[in-house]
Image (cartoon, rainbow, N blue to C red):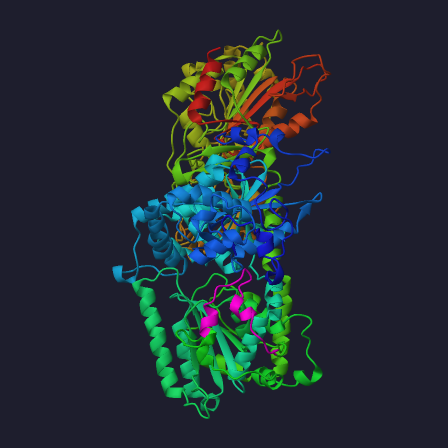
Amino acid sequence: MTMIGSCTNLADLLSGGSGMGAGGGNGGPGLGGGGGGGLSSLRRSKRSGSERSLHSESTDSSLADKDKDGNLIRPQRIILISNNLPIRGRKATAQEAAEGVAGGGTSPSAAANLGWIFEWDEDALVGQIKLGVLEQQDGGRQLGVLFVGQLNVDIPENEQDVVSEEIYRRFGCIPVFIPSETKDLFYKGFCKSILWPTMHYLVPLTPKCGRRFDRRAWQAYIAANKCFVDRVVEFINPDDDMVWIHDYHLIVLPTLLRKRFHALRIGYFLHCPFPSSEVFRAMPCRDELLRSMLNADVIGFHTYDYARHFLSCINRALGVDHESKRGTIGVMYYGRRVVIRISPTGVHCGRLLQGFDWPECEWRRGELIADLQNCTVALGVDDLDVFKGIDLKIEAVGRMLDAYPGIRGKFTLIQVVNAPRSLNAEVAELRDTIRELTEDINRRHGQPGADGKEAYKPIQLIERHVPLHERIALYSVADVFVVSATRDGMNLFPYEYIVCRQGPPQHDLHDSEEEMYGMAAAAAAAAVPAGGLGSIVMGGANSTAAAGADASDADGAPRSVRQRSTTSAPPPPRDSMLVVSEFVGCSPSLSGALRVNPYNTDGFADALHSACTIPLAERRVRHKRHWEYVRGHTAQSWGATFVDELWSTTRDHSKLRCHGLGFGLQFRVVALDETFKKLDAFTVLQSYQLAAAAPDAARRLFMLDYDGTLTVGVIRGQQQGGPGSSTPGQDIPTQGMQRVKSSQSMASTGRAPSAEVLDMLRGLCKNENNVVAIVSGRSRLELSHWFLPAGAPGSDGGGNTDDLDAEAIADPLNRLMLCAEHGMFYRYPSRGWRMAGMAEEEMGALMGSETTSAAVSAMAVSADGADGAAGSSLAPPVSYGQVFHTASDGVDVVGLPFADADTDWRSVALPVLRQYAECTDGAHVEAKETSLVWRYTFTDAEFGGRQAKELMDHLEDVLAHDHSVEVVRGSGIVEVKPVEATKGNCVRRIITQMNPALPRWCLCVGDDQSDESMFTTLEELLADAKSKPSGQGMTRTKSALALGSKRGDEPAAEVWTATVGSKPSAAHYFVNDPVEVVEMLRSLGSK
């Protein structure tokens, strides 16, 4: 304990029996001290580079700290942010104030006269993390730790600066001060009345069942989180620090921090349960809370159940899916991989074991043993909370005493009830219920005292704060520990119980003691003073009750008790028994515990009786199993491993460029590769003009996607604001828009190009040296009707040349190249449609600069006539695009196009798809010319996803021997298609057919996952090509890629790949939206 202004530092406070261990004075590496200077020096320590990045939209890897070998240096400080600091504060009495100044031996500081006393909170989990972090060293340097949070006392505004300086200097903590009105609405109005019940599965169905959503309380919650951000901004170094945020009070803090510092390393841990999606979806602000959690880099949960519910929520509400890789669950969220970590917390074993040597602890153990001789003791330690199930526990004890008369008089439940932080009507009613149940059971099953002994009471209530030394004593004498919570995040009391039943190593048992059992063995091993358990009941008027109320030292031990003469208590028996609710977070890790449903009172009572009568040998086996787990999973190791995970997840962040997207709590960061840049239209125009001015009339290739690139597609089945795309492959979010490929479903709404787009394409096609290709997933019929003038070759979607119109042939759009269904059908300039795999002709002559438009048209007519005679062109499409719902009359597979020996896979795949559609409400099957699609966009997200995974496995099994098709999964679809049906293959075919007249300038623009193969294929072709030596041909720049001709005498080419929207992509550039694409192409077509 320290009083502000005294010379005592935290290292002194934590020495002796505390076990916190510290070392070093102010500014040293130990727990205490925030450094030799105060907060002002901490603020000055911010690097100028950090300040520059405060509002920047990107990060530069050059700013990251690196060692002499160029390796990234691990951050040297972790900032732990929680609602409450691990400090207890109170106002000093007049005597304490005088002692604090005089006893310190120094001149009083400015804060000493304020009379505040602060001490380190040994029980605060966030404080125990520091020891584990301090054990981690990198290059011989320890990680620094800084705590941020509120104090447990209200500090007047005129004293806040002085208190802040002292608390930082002595404890390394930064206090956050929230205005009183906001604080009350934040904590009582939202956290405890709305968020806490929802997290524990309590939805207010009526006004009497709980407080319903209050917009004012929600705004106060946001405002309070902003107070934390404003405090952190004062001293954070975003390039050097890691931030770890704790619990439900600060869920929106990751978003608020991410808005300020896009690449900040952020961890978040939820210490309470996370409910199922059916409960959490009732929260009006669910999307904001989920998105904010996803703005962290690592999200921690106590159990897999909580993590599973969270993953289900983000899938249902936001359309975000997850994946498991090398045992780690990850979520790809706007280019960042967010790791979901399942990491149960632990306890500080060393501090608990050291407590056995405290005189007051030995004295208290001896007193308890004397009172409870020949009695089996069960212990419960709970907060006064409706979710702790204290009343259910007491009812189960009463039921056990009713059902098993032989245990009456030999069993005692000691129930510690910690006072709530706020007492409302519901908690007050629960307190009264607990007292009434206790009085009733004690009246029915209690026994009067004899020979001066106190009356026997089967239930002893302790309704006060129990100091550490007394809690250790209670743990060590309890034969059974009982947890009855109906919902609880973790509950570390069972872990503490296991540690205290094990005892320190020096308390080894002798063989003779091992034959004895429980309290009987303990009582027989020591002579203890007489005393009554009634002394520890709230309101007991005796010395023990007074001792519990004494002022405590920093280690939690009363000073007055330390001065008493003590009697040695026996060593702990090293056996234990746990009865644990199956709804508690620690339940999965305690494999030897008896798990109960606290609502099943009869089953609960039977489990209590079994725990009291189980053989000693089995108790020891179970205890050993629990002890091995608890000592291997301490609070320190939990903190250290989480920090390790946060560092390993974010160590490559310096290689990313982060761009902010969205407003308010919808904000998120799009993480891109550091080489990924905004495409500058002026630079592209200059490059295009240089290529056009080449003396050899260089050819130029445009490869353009349609939906989402030249026009915005139609949103179907996606939540507003969630990432998604209906094309096969992984979801990739776009900037403010969800674009889908309508051709993925003939049932989706088509969107014809605008007159502006058609005019732009005409401008590009007018130039004889421009080859313009639309590469789309839409059908050939749609593309023909939209882009080709009536009477042009292929305008009917087929390959015949009947009724050709001279005016249509002369239209520049006749020179447009069209690729349908991802390249399975294509139309070369001035030609009819062909299917991939048919006889193809070289395009070099068609693309040559010496060929006039009239010559091309004449060649097209004659060639199409010949092709039609040869039968290599296609007829117009018929009867495709049908949507086959779950009909009982079946589907005529033979009637589908191309239903011949080469497409027997349809007859195998279609029945399977129909079967899954019938079993999945909202799913249906779509048939294209060359593929079959099972669409589950409108199904339940979780069930549809499971069905899709199983369907993929089923299809891969039945089509395992057919290597001509593949099964792919996209956003809301499972598709069976030919392996060659990719835009990458389409690009490869076009480039091959243009050889040897390869283009020397290329622009490729797309917007979704299906377009990525275009970019990567161009990269592959460029890597294989042979470019001329430096100094010949076009100069290579950082902003362009070199494409060499397969002929050695061709100069290099410039290739520009761009995706629409700032998102992760294989392209090297991005443009903001289709409007920018059309504007840029129009400017190129006008030159």
**Which residue lies at the image location 46% right of the left edge and 54% below the top edge?**
97
Percent across and percent down for residue 419 are 40, 65
Q: Is residue 549 magenta?
A: yes
Placement of 432 over or under 856, stated as above or below:
below
Q: Nearer the viewer, residue 23 or 235?
A: 23
Total number of numbered discs in the rendering:
0
Q: Nearer the viewer, residue 684 or 546?
A: 546
Which residue is outermost to the bottom? 451
Q: Is residue 328 left or right of residue 748?
A: right
Percent across and percent down for residue 155 are 40, 48
Percent across and percent down for residue 425 are 30, 64
Percent across and percent down for residue 578 are 54, 74
Q: Is residue 58 left or right of residue 1078?
A: right
Query: In this view of the protein, can residue 495 be seen by the observer?
Result: yes
Query: In this view of the protein, can residue 603 be seen by the observer?
Result: no
Q: Is residue 197 left or right of residue 348?
A: left
> Which of the 4 image quadrants contains residue 456?
bottom left
Q: Which residues are magenta?
A: 545-569
Magenta: main secondary structure equals loop
Q: Nearer the viewer, residue 261 or 967?
A: 261
Which residue is outermost to the top? 695
Q: Nearer the viewer, residue 129 or 933?
A: 129
Placement of 463 over or under 653, stated as above or below:
below
Q: Is residue 131 magenta?
A: no
Which residue is outermost to the left? 207
